[in-house]
């Protein structure tokens, strides 16, 4: 049993907004939808909800065709980006609005109000008006308003985008727990890659109204199918390269801007490739003082551009050019060598252990399985799929 979209397209005023969107999402799982602004993410949710009715194609859930049903007849809840709470109603009245519209018995209304309010930890806020609530509290009220209706499908359009980082972290963990507990089928639009990886059973990347790639989060982020997906999912290191030769059944040797690296990737087609390495896949394995220090001779050990050990690539000769703090206990290092730029993530502890500063030379390692190669076309355009 699944939510199945088959060749769903949407045209508005002769503009094709969605083009033949197809996917299957097993019941009780989460599909995270990623894409640039204007890619069609919100319109896709509206089509599933029945709010944009002039689509073609089919939407089937659990064997039931939803395509021609009115929005109120679909087993769907929608949490909007701006919460859409009624300012003149209390939190409790907002939450109960849908149940009252359905003329549910008072006992049922109170039962579900208390159950969901306790679950979302807002039972002490029920008498407050939206203006008296923080952004995170308003978001919980908006989520509660959907959950009391017990939807089988929950649509969330960037639900946490207006919140601070700490509130986002708390709410995304809460939503994941509730989703798993009640096995709600969920379509979740976000721009946040961490949310996508945490929430999603599947991730769909959409560009200009078309599905570019769909799959488990680890595949989308580690094995992008195009340069556009690699760039959009923050691969950050996307370098021109060339396949040199096979080094066995599971390894290729690839030339990358003057370096030779082992890769477990086997792209079809031309020998010209894009070599993609995510910054978190690098390991910082050694460091040396900057040239000109008393220990300058130690830096000479890193003069060779590359050595290979097993299926790990050991890369030397790069110098730290910037150290940029990130959220959490990590920093982003910018390394440069002979005009080549690499970005890698390292822990604050590793930076402190090596006493790293701008100007230090470093040795880094990356496993062959983490070097992903894509065919490179002569007319390849940055940020567009091949």
Image (cartoon, helix red, strand yellow):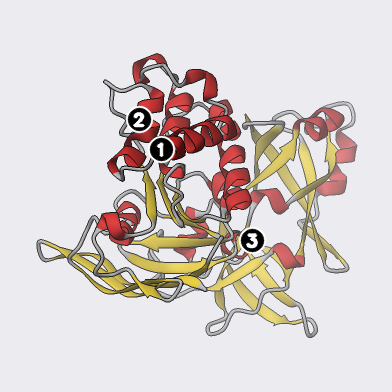
In the rendered structure, are the residues bearing label 2 and label 3 in contact, judged by CB atoms less than 8 Å apart? Answer: no
Residue holding disc 3: 218
Q: If the image is split into quadrants, where does the C terminus sit?
A: bottom left
In depth, the one of 112 and 244 nearer the eye is 112
In the rendered structure, are the residues bearing label 2 and label 1 in contact, judged by CB atoms less than 8 Å apart? Answer: yes
Residue 337: give x, y in percent of width and height: 66, 48
Residue 87 found in image quarter: top left
Residue 113: give x, y in percent of width and height: 47, 33
Query: Nearer the observer, disc 2 or disc 3?
Result: 2
Look at the numbered disc 1 and give the secondary structure of its residue. helix
The outermost residue toward the left is 13
Asked if residue 209 is positioned above or below residue 248 in the image, the reply reads: above
Q: Residue at x 37, y 34 (%)?
A: 96
Residue 339 seen in the current view: no
Residue 1: give x, y in percent of width and height: 52, 74
Query: Nearer the observer, disc 3 or disc 1?
Result: 1
In the rendered structure, the answer to whether residue 263 lies left or right of residue 87 reads right
Residue 94 is tagged as 2
Q: Earlier in the sequence, mark 2 or mark 1?
A: 2
- Near mark 3 (Cα within 10 A), the count class, few <14, some 14-19 or many ≥20, is some
Look at the numbered disc 2 and give the secondary structure of its residue. helix
> Mark 2 to mark 1: distance in Å?
7 Å
In the rendered structure, the answer to whether residue 140 lies left or right of residue 177 reads left
Residue holding disc 1: 145
Q: Residue at x 30, y 34 (%)?
A: 84
> Mark 3 to mark 1: distance in Å?
33 Å
Q: Earlier in the sequence, mark 2 or mark 3?
A: 2
Look at the numbered disc 3 and give the secondary structure of its residue. helix
- Near mark 2 (Cα within 10 A), the count class, few <14, some 14-19 or many ≥20, is many
In the rendered structure, the answer to whether residue 253 lies left or right of residue 182 reads right
Asked if residue 200 is positioned above or below residue 353 in the image, the reply reads: below
> Mark 2 to mark 3: distance in Å?
38 Å
């Amino acid at each position: 049993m699944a939510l199945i979209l088959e060749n769903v397209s949407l045209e508005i005023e002769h503009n094709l907004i969605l083009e033949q969107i197809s996917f299957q999402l097993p019941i009780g799982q989460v599909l995270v939808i990623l894409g640039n602004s204007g890619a069609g993410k919100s319109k896709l949710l509206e089509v599933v909800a029945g709010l944009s009715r002039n689509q073609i194609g089919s939407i089937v859930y659990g064997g039931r065709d939803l395509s021609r049903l009115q929005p109120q007849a679909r087993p769907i809840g929608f949490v909007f980006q701006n919460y859409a709470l009624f300012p003149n109603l209390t939190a409790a009245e907002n939450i109960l609005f849908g149940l009252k519209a359905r003329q549910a018995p008072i006992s049922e209304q109170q039962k579900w109000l208390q159950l969901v309010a306790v679950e979302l930890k807002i039972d002490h806020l029920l008498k407050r008006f939206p203006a008296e609530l923080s952004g995170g509290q308003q978001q919980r009220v908006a989520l509660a308003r959907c959950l009391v209706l017990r939807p089988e499908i929950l649509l969330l359009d960037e639900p946490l985008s207006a919140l601070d980082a700490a509130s986002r972290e708390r709410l995304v963990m809460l939503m994941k727990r509730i989703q798993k507990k009640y096995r709600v089928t969920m379509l979740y639009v976000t721009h946040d890659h961490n949310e996508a990886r945490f929430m999603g059973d599947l991730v769909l990347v959409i560009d200009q109204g078309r599905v570019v790639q769909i799959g488990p989060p680890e595949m989308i982020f580690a094995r992008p199918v195009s340069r556009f997906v690699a760039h959009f999912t923050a691969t950050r290191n996307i370098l021109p390269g060339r396949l040199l030769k096979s080094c066995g059944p599971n390894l290729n040797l690839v030339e990358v801007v003057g370096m030779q690296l082992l890769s477990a990737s086997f792209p079809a087609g031309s020998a010209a490739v894009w070599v993609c390495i995510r910054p978190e896949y690098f390991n910082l394995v050694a460091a040396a003082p900057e040239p000109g220090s008393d220990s300058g001779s130690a830096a000479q050990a890193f003069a060779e551009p590359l050595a290979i050990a097993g299926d790990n690539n050991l890369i030397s000769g790069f110098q730290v050019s910037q150290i940029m703090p990130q959220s959490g206990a990590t920093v982003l290092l910018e390394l440069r060598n002979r005009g080549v730029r690499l970005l890698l993530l390292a822990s604050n502890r590793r930076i402190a252990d090596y006493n790293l500063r701008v100007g230090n030379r470093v040795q880094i390692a990356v496993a062959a399985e983490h070097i992903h190669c894509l065919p490179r076309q002569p007319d390849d355009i940055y940020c567009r799929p091949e």
